[in-house]
Image (tube, coloured by chain):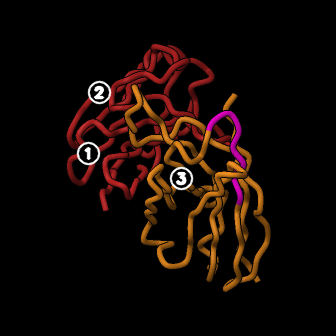
Amino acid sequence: EVQLVETGGGLIQPGGSLRLSCAASGFSVSSNYMSWVRQAPGKGLEWVSVLNSGGHTYYADSVKGRFTISRDTSKNTLFLQMNSLRADDTAVYFCARGHYYDRTPMGGFDSWGQGTLVTVSS
Amino acid sequence: DIQLTQSPPSLSASIGDRVTITCRASQTVYNFLNWYQQKPGKAPKLLIFAASRLQSGVPSRFSGSGSGTDFTLTISNLQPEDFATYYCQQGYSNLYTFGRGTNLKI
């Protein structure tokens, strides 16, 4: 069974740093493209970052230069290092597994974690 | 970045109704367009991928159509469990984007 479990959220002051983890089971994070998606309170979904199976990374303009996505294949875990946090980074952060059809990446996400809340406030 | 304009932002309907939600992309995404359902406090759920393909386990009353820049999600014979927020998402560009969502209310 595919499962994603995010941890690492919490209350952090503006300018601070936080690292989110997403522990995967039932599949290999290194064989899939994996993303972080966030949702501010009462707002819509915002794509944050993707790490593809080839190791390439991409970021939304809103987080580029501040956030870093990575993975640890030995732990089968995806990470999001968040630096220089701002109030508008406050959100539930979801990790999501890339969706393949007939071994072709379809650009969507078919499994999601439950999310972890990051609150940036003084 | 590719922008997705989703409409309407909210929609009221009744059990048994048929509803349509539209999603327009600022440039072509070919058929790399996905639809999700999200209920309060839950993670999104993939409903439709490649614009018109039904994800495994999703009821056949959900359907998608379109290509290029204009897409629709149709829900026929609305059931109580269908009242939720729906999002489109493009996966053509490596800079993925979501629409702003449509809140489907009773």
Residue A92 image position (x, y, % from top left): 67, 57
Residues tagged by mark 3 and mark 2 found on one chain of the structure:
no
Q: Indicate the quadrant containing the C terminus of chain A: top left, top right, bottom left or bottom right.
A: bottom right
Crowding around mark 3 (Cα neighbors within 10 Å: few <14, some 14 to 19, many 20+) is many
Q: Residue at x 51, y 61 (%)?
A: A48
Is residue A25 inside the magenta stretch?
Answer: yes
Amino acid type at circle 2 is Ser
Q: Chain of mark 2?
A: B
Q: Which residues are magenta?
A: A21-27
Distance CA(mark 3)–CA(mark 2): 25 Å
Q: Residue at x 58, y 40 (%)?
A: B44
Against B59, residue B20 (above or below) is below
Distance CA(mark 1)–CA(mark 2): 13 Å
What secondary structure is marked by label 3? strand
Q: Which chain is red?
A: B
Visual hue assigned to chain A: orange
Q: Indicate the quadrant containing the N terminus of chain A: top left, top right, bottom left or bottom right.
A: top right
Amino acid type at circle 3 is Ser
Which mark is first along the chain, 2 or 1? 1
What secondary structure is marked by label 2? strand
Give left or right: position of A72 versus B30.
Answer: right
Q: Which residue is mark 2?
A: B65
Q: Which residue is mark 3?
A: A35
